[in-house]
Amino acid sequence: PQELVAFKDTLTVLDLGSSGDDAVDNNPNKLGGTIPAAIGKLELLSRLVLDGNEIEGSIPTGVANNLLNLQELRLGNNRMSGPVPSFGALTSLKTLDLQANQLAGSLDWGDFVSVPDLSHIHCGNNRITGVLPPQLGFLGFLSKLEVLDLSSNSISGTLP
């Protein structure tokens, strides 16, 4: 909560997730509630990992707009809902993991113009709608994209 602001000048990694190399499969974290708006004030964060918990609510605006040093955002496998925010301000972002939530709305592909190093987009198993841009394979601003997971959503269009 608000106490996190005390670390705003020092904290670069906040990992309370339940996946990855350090996770124990049969002992996951079970953090609940919502993401505190105060996390958006931790402007030095390069990694924010809260995946595999029981977090609800929407993604705070401050997370999508203020964490300009963020390279890795992992909020997957929670109970989050609401719209998918714009991530265009996160120009250092390399990994965006929002999979297995209940996020709705569409991805604004134009947002990713300012995110040149984005290599992993994991947004499967949500309620995302919209059209896959026909020029996706030719978008110079996604030239480093290695993984694009939009499975189990309501995406339409044709394969690029």
Image (cartoon, rainbow, N blue to C red):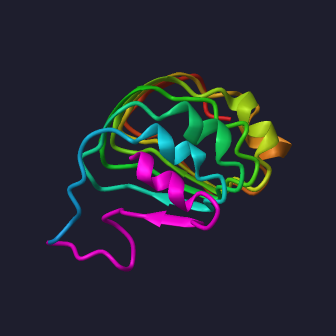
Q: Residue furthest right?
A: 140
Give coordinates of residue 118: x percent, y percent: 69, 53
The residue that appears at 73% across and 39% down in the rendered structure is 89
Q: In terms of image quadrants, where is residue 23? A: bottom left
Question: Residue sitting at 49 percent across and 34 percent down?
Answer: 60
Q: Quadrant of residue 101?
A: top left
Span shown in magenta: 1-26
Which is the main secondary structure of the residues drawn in magenta? loop
Q: Is residue 108 above or below residue 80?
A: above
* 141 vs 82: above or below: below
Q: From the top left corner, tell me how far across and down residue 49 is, in percent.
A: 45, 59
Q: Nearer the viewer, residue 53 or 5?
A: 5
Tell me what residue is drawn at x 51 percent, y 29 percent: 84
Is residue 149 visible in the rendered structure shown here?
A: no
Asked if 106 appears above or below 43 in the picture, the reply is above
Quarter of the rendering containing residue 146: bottom right
On screen, residue 117 versus residue 140, left or right, reads left
Residue 150 sits inside the magenta stretch:
no
Q: Position of residue 133 (x, y in %)?
A: 68, 27
